[in-house]
Amino acid sequence: MAVHEHRRKTEESIRCLVLTVSDTRDERTDKSGKLIMKGLEEAGHVTSDYGIVKDEKERSLPGFIKAWKRLPSMSFF
C-alpha cells in the first residue's frame, strides 16, 4: 500500500510515547528520540510523552511503563 493510500484510509492520528533507553544520553543529546518524534509528527501522529531511562531495567523502565499504561488513549510506545 502506498503512503498516500494509507493516509487516506487512516481516520485518526495515533498518540505515541517515545522512550529512549541509554546510559549516555539526556534530552539535549538524544538525537534518535528527537528523530523518532519528528517522523511521527510528520506522519500526522502525536507524541504525548517522551522520556529517557538508564539502561538498568530493574530500576527505571518498569516505573515508566506502569505510569504510561495509566494514561488514557495511548496507542503506541
Image: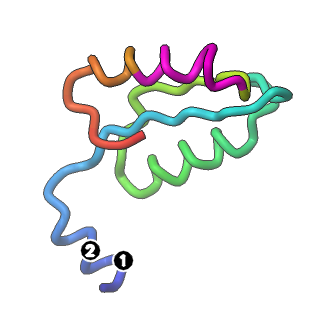
Quadrant in the rendering for residue 3: bottom left
Q: Residue at x 60, y 16 (%)?
A: 60
Residue 58 painted magenta: yes
Q: Amino acid at mark 2?
A: His
Residue that appears at 46% across and 50% down:
40
Quadrant the N terminus occupies: bottom left
| Circle 1 SS class | helix
The quarter of the rendered structure image containing the C terminus is top left
Q: Which residues are magenta?
A: 56-65
**Left/right of residue 8 with respect to residue 52 in the rendered view:** left
Q: Position of residue 30 (x, y in %)?
A: 75, 34
Q: Which mark is residue 6?
A: 2
Relative side of 20 to 12, left or right? right
Badge 2 element? helix
Q: Which mark is residue 58?
A: none
Residue visible at 56% across and 23% down in the picture: 61
Q: Circle 1 is placed at which residue position? A: 3
What amino acid is at disc 1? Val
- Residue 73 horizontal side relative to residue 61, left or right: left
Q: Residue reaching furthest bottom?
A: 1
> Dot 1, crowdedness within 10 Å: few (<14), some or many (≥20)?
few
Instruction: Compute the Cα span from label 1 to label 2.
Output: 5 Å
Q: Is residue 59 above or below residue 45?
A: above
> Residue extending furthest front?
58
Percent of width and height locating residue 16: 38, 39
Q: How many residues crowd around disc 2 within 10 Å: few (fewer than 14), some, or many (20 or more)?
A: few
**Residue 59: quadrant of the picture:** top right
At a point 49% along the width and 14% down the height, the residue shown is: 63
Q: Give the image location of residue 23, x and y in percent.
A: 81, 27
Q: Position of residue 70 (x, y in %)?
A: 27, 17
User: Is there CB contact under 8 Å for labels 1 and 2?
Assistant: yes
Does the magenta portion include 10? Answer: no
